[in-house]
Image (cartoon, grey):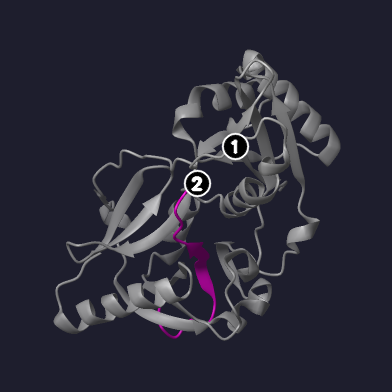
Amino acid sequence: MGSIWELDFYSRPILDENQKKVWEVLVCQTPLETRTKIDSLFRFAKYCPSTEVNSAWLRTALEEAIGKAGETPRRIRFFRRQMNNMITKACKDLGIPAEPSRRTLLLKQWLQQRVEQVYPQEPGYQASTNPSVNLEKSSPQRLPDALEGKQWTFVTLKGADFTGMHEWEIGFSEAFPLEIAQVSPETPIPGVLIYSPRALPIAGWMSGLELAWLKVDQGARLVLETGATESWILANIKNPQTIAEAKGFEEAKQKANGVHFLAVQSNPQEESFAGFWLLQEVNLP
């Protein structure tokens, strides 16, 4: 199937000899399973002069990365919406789909590491705050009728339970090593399990989205965040007991450093999953 890459192309807190910001492209391979060894994943970094910031330079840098990786990714994720045009054009010229996504967990971790350990060692480093990505979010959309689950429930697994996830029978899935989120095997991981006779179509539809995370909003709605700014209402929570469970879900998610999961099954007796995704709510750099 090929790999998925995460990409950032933006200015860094480094000034060149003309007192202009130095830019940098970062590329890393997305981990897709809990057993993935992070150190084995492909990474590529290259500085770009401020006078050459354009899609042509980025395309050439990506060609270099592809040459070093020995493969072309099947798609590329990026979180900076302000760089949308430049990134999508460079990728389009290479025949690679590029998608805005908040599911760039390894890239976020790597970028934070470089902010703390790499950039301060560079000539021309200028200490500054790292501005967060401001996203104008759209209002949550209602799920298409055919994709609504028959019932759903809050559930919990331990971090250690995900060790053998690659052996589970799952139709559509994506995960990541819990070490990315610095979560121990003993940590309770909260999740939401959806049951529906149309489990496979629902899971297939979800797999076509860039799943970011689940949250319970102030309106007591269970919301699925996707892409860069999109969101979907999975359920309206009205029962007092379920509202209390929703509060417990958010509290457990916070204790698990934002890690949680979403699963889809045809019924509670089914042992296989139509879909299973490990998620993490994060603040983008």
Q: Is residue 260 above or below residue 271?
A: above
User: Residues in magenta?
Assistant: 266-285
Is residue 164 within the magenta segment?
Answer: no
Residue under the point 69% across and 18% down: 17
At mark 1, the secondary structure is strand
Earlier sequence position, callout 1 versus callout 2: 1
Relative image position of residue 283 (x, y in whole percent): 44, 53
Determine which quarter of the picture holds residue 33.
Answer: bottom right
Determine which quarter of the picture holds residue 198.
Answer: bottom left
The reply to whether residue 190 is in sight is: yes
Residue under the point 29% across and 71% down: 150
Q: Nearer the viewer, residue 203 or 21?
A: 21
Instruction: Report the residue marked by disc 1.
Output: 8
Q: Is residue 17 above or below residue 172?
A: above
Is residue 274 within the magenta segment?
Answer: yes
Relative image position of residue 205 (x, y in whole percent): 44, 52
